[in-house]
């Protein structure tokens, strides 16, 4: 066997090694993307879980019971709690929308996220003024759909409450 043949075999083996390495790396990137999507969905759901846990504390439950009526007669401490709840929910929505826009949250999870605010407002219409105020105070976020979704939910909650 001459050196040209040995060189050709070496080139073929090198190309094969590169091809196998590329396949391996592609599988690793695919797994990494799956993990990132799963992690983003888990983070968003955990954030909602924290909000739900907050709603079950005795003082917050008392404030939310008052929020079932319009107008609501909140104490100053309850107003602080409701205001912080609104900001916290808006932060969860921004987190979810950012994850969705970056491809880390699937469309089904994101649509569930967008729909979750309406039942809260329908059940607790006394929170609507606090959401309105939070929207005014919230930093400009460009074209984030979350705010249009909250605005529509507020309008719908107000319509439900007036019926």
Image (spheres, grey):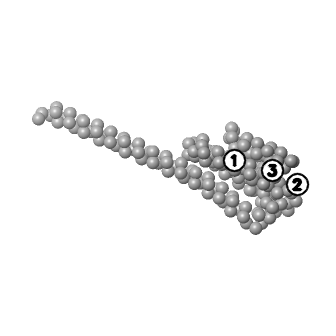
Q: Between 38 and 22, which is closer to the camera in this rendering? A: 38
Q: Residues within 10 Å of mark 1 (few under 14, many from 20)?
A: few
* 13 and 108: which is toward the camera: 108
Sequence-first disc among 1 and 3: 1
Q: Which residue is mark 2?
A: 71
What mark, if any, has residue 51 been given in the picture? none
| Residue at (66% x, 56% y) in the render | 48
Location of residue 24 with respect to 56 vertically, above or below? above
**What is the residue that sits farthest to the bottom in this orientation?**
58
Secondary structure at numbered mark 3: helix
Secondary structure, mark 1, is helix
Tell me the CA gap for discs 2 and 3: 10 Å
Q: Which residue is mark 1?
A: 115
Q: Residue at x 54, y 52 (%)?
A: 39
Up-down: is 3 above or below 118? above
Left or right position of 3 against 76: left
Mark linked to residue 128: 3
Q: Position of residue 89 (x, y in %)?
A: 70, 52
The quadrant in which the N terminus is found is top left
Q: For the point 74% across and 51% down, which residue is it?
A: 119
Q: CA distance from mark 1 to mark 2?
A: 24 Å
Residue sticking out furthest to the left: 1
Res 147 quadrant in image: top right
Q: Nearer the viewer, mark 1 or mark 3?
A: 1
Sequence order check, earlier mark of 1 and 2? 2
Element marked by disc 2: loop
Q: CA distance from mark 1 to mark 3?
A: 16 Å
Residue 156 x %, y %: 79, 45
Residue 130 seen in render = no
Q: Considering only order in the chain, which callout, 3 or 2, is on the residue closer to the N terminus? A: 2
């Amino acid at each position: 066997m001459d050196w040209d043949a040995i060189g050709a075999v070496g080139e073929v083996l090198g190309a094969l090694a590169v091809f196998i390495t590329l396949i391996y790396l592609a599988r690793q990137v695919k797994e990494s993307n799956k993990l990132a999507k799963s992690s983003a969905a888990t983070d968003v759901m955990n954030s909602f879980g924290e909000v739900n846990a907050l709603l079950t504390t005795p003082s917050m439950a008392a404030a939310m019971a008052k929020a079932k009526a319009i107008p609501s007669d909140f104490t100053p401490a309850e107003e602080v709690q409701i205001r912080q709840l609104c900001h916290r929910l808006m932060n969860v929505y921004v987190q979810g929308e950012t994850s969705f826009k970056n491809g880390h949250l699937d469309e089904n999870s994101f649509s569930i996220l967008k729909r979750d605010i309406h039942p809260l407002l329908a059940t607790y219409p006394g929170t609507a003024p606090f959401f309105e105020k939070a929207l005014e105070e919230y930093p400009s976020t460009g074209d984030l759909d979350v705010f249009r979704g909250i605005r529509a939910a507020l309008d719908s909650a107000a319509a439900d409450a007036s019926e």
